[in-house]
Amino acid sequence: MNDKNKKINNLKNSNKKKDNINLLNDKIKSLKEELDLKNSNLSILKKKISDLKKKIFNINLRYNADIDNINKRNEKNNKKIYKYCLEKFMFDLLPIVDNLKHALKNLSNKKVDINITYEGINLILKNFISTIKKFGVSIIDKVNVPFNPNYHQAMIILNSDKKDKDNFVEDILQEGYMLNDRLLRPAMVKVIKYINK
C-alpha cells in the first residue's frame, strides 16, 4: 500500500503541478494581454504626441509668418508715414510761399509803396507763425522771466543793482522754438545779473 499511496501522492502532486503550471500559463497569458494592451495604448499615445508636435510646429510656422508679415506691413506703413508726414504742413505753407512770391514781384515794381509792402510782409509773417503754431511749434520770446538754461542761451550778461531782477531775461536777441515739448532751438537772451555794490 505504501507504493500505492506514493503513486497516488505523486499523481496528486503531478496534478497540482499541472494546475499550478496552468495557473501560471493563464497568468502569463493575462499579463501578455495586459502588456499588449499597454503597448497598444503607448503606441496610440506616441502617435498623439507626434501629431501634437506636428501641430505645434505648424502653428509656430504660421505664427512666425504672421509676425514677419506684420513687421513688413509696419515697416511699409512707417516708411509711408515718414515719407508723407509733412504733407499737411507743407500744404498749409504753400499759400505763404505764394504770398512771398507776390511780395517779391511787387518789390520789383519801381512804384512800390513801402508801407503797403511792409504791412503785406508782416501779414505773411503772422500767417506763417499761425501755421507753425497749428502744428505744435511754440515760440520762446518772453522777457522779464527767470532765466532757464533749458530754454535760454545767455549771450550777454548785464550787471544791475536791482536784486529782484537777478537772473531774469532782459531782452531776446533771437527767439527760441519748441516743437510740442521738445526744444528745437534755445532763445538767445540778455540776462540781468545782480551786483552788490
Image (cartoon, helix red, strand yellow):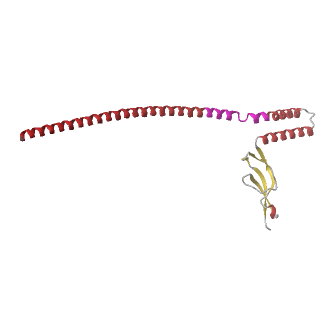
Q: Is residue 195 above or below residue 127?
A: below
The magenta segment: 73-92
**Quarter assignment of residue 195:** bottom right
Asked whether 86 falls inside the magenta stretch, the response is yes
Asked whether 60 falls inside the magenta stretch, the response is no
Whole-percent x and y of residue 2? 6, 41
Q: Quadrant of the N terminus?
A: top left
> For this rendering, which residue is in front, 134 or 17?
17
> For this rendering, which residue is in front, 20 or 41?
20
Seen at 81% across and 63% down, the residue is 164
Whole-percent x and y of residue 94? 80, 33
Left or right: residue 139 versus residue 56 is right
Seen at 6% across and 39% down, the residue is 3
Left or right: residue 44 versus residue 192 is left
Count of marks overlaid on the render = 0
**Quarter assignment of residue 127:** top right
Q: Quadrant of the C terminus?
A: bottom right
Whole-percent x and y of residue 37? 34, 33
> For this rendering, which residue is in front, 14 or 134?
14
Left or right: residue 56 versus residue 20 is right
